[in-house]
Image (cartoon, rainbow, N blue to C red):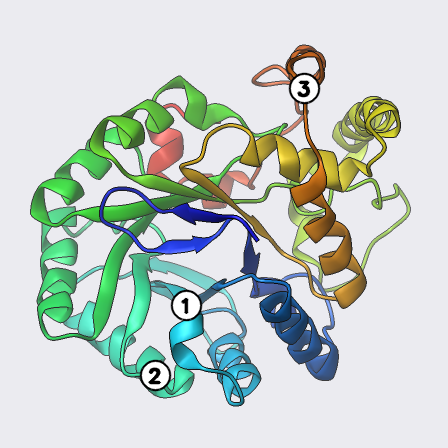
Amino acid sequence: MEQRKLGKSGPTTSAIGLGCMGMSDFYGPADRAESIATIHSALEAGITLLDTGDFYGMGHNEMLIREALSSRHRDQVQISVKFGALRDVERNWHGYDGRPAAVKNFLGYSLQRLGVEAIDIYRPARLDPDVPIEDTIGAMAEMVKKGYIKHIGLSEVGSETIRRAHAVHPISDLQIEYSLVSRGIESDILKTCRELGIGITAYGVLSRGLISGHWSKDRSEAKDFRRMSPRFQGENLDRNLALVESLRAISEEIGATPAQVAIAWVAAQGADIVPLVGARRRERLDEALGAVNVKLTSMHLASLAKLFPPGVAAGHRYPESQLAHMDSEKRGAA
């Protein structure tokens, strides 16, 4: 597995990371044994970066990762954790908390659930509009000095916030959605990160399965977050699935699957970008890992750029209620 360094101050990780969210939340029922087997397969294939959030399954995801890593060497894995999202007993959303005291509270619980002495990359899940980012990062910097956090990251914030945070403490990476159909960071945010030497961990590289080549119009699960996603609704879905057929045609020419080409495209956008794949099952992980062997030529990249220009997707990437909490959207990402 190729290695990539996350920014000037961040760790060196595998060129592809594993996003573990779907093993606990948002995409319908998950299988515990299969989830653990998938994590083990990822580690055996050379993936070292595991991404989670303390609110994924209300702590379930962190405990799942702890169980999966119980027989592994801790120093061979980097764990990235998002914090700050507020949810109630019915799993409804109530904003984000970035107060210094809350940072330390969230961190303490995550360390306990994960069973680790330090978290490799710790990041606010979203910007708390009521707390200056300097205060949030300042509290995290204290925890770095005490050895509880190794690196500080950010998630879904715009250029102004990135600069303010980086002025307080070096930021290793920005976690943000980036894919063939979500290219908004290219207009400003990506340039800012590169100017400051901040890496990118790109999630949603398959747009939650939309451009994987496996999604069908009649597919739906009762507890699946995608039922509320604008890109999976009505005419938007029809238009987006038509894009997938164009991707499928190019993929067949290349000799790969649509998912592999989509992942390879993100990886090809720069050595400072690490795609996160959200595989919940070993078969999907195996397919995603095949992306490392996909070599996109300049002609391939030109064809993909023509078919997938910025703004090509029908519908926003999140419902309006969630976009309101995304600093990255307010600063020009789409």
Secondary structure category for the residue under label 3: loop
Instruction: Please rate how many residues cluster around mark 1, counting C-alpha atoms within 10 Å: few if below 14, some from 14 to 19, many from 20.
Output: many
- Residue in the image at 88% along x and 29% along y: 252
**Residue 179 coordinates in the image, percent (x, y):** 59, 33
* 300 relative position to 111: left or right: right
**Residue 182 coordinates in the image, percent (x, y):** 56, 30
**Residue 239 coordinates in the image, percent (x, y):** 79, 24
Q: Amino acid at mark 3?
A: Thr
Mark pair 1, 2: CA separation: 10 Å
Q: Amino acid at mark 1?
A: Ile
Work out whether 24 lies above or below 299: below
Mark pair 3, 2: CA separation: 42 Å
- The residue that disc 1 covers is 79
Contact flag, marks 1 and 2 (Cβ < 8 Å): yes
Q: Which mark is residue 116?
A: 2
Work out whether 232 lies above or below 140: above
> Residue 232: in sight, yes or no?
no
Q: Amino acid at mark 2?
A: Val
Instruction: Please rate how many residues cluster around mark 3, counting C-alpha atoms within 10 Å: few if below 14, some from 14 to 19, many from 20.
Output: few
- The residue that disc 3 covers is 297
* 282 relative position to 54: left or right: right
Report the front residue among 83 and 153.
Answer: 153
Where on the picture, by quarter, is residue 187?
Answer: top left
**Residue 68 coordinates in the image, percent (x, y):** 57, 82
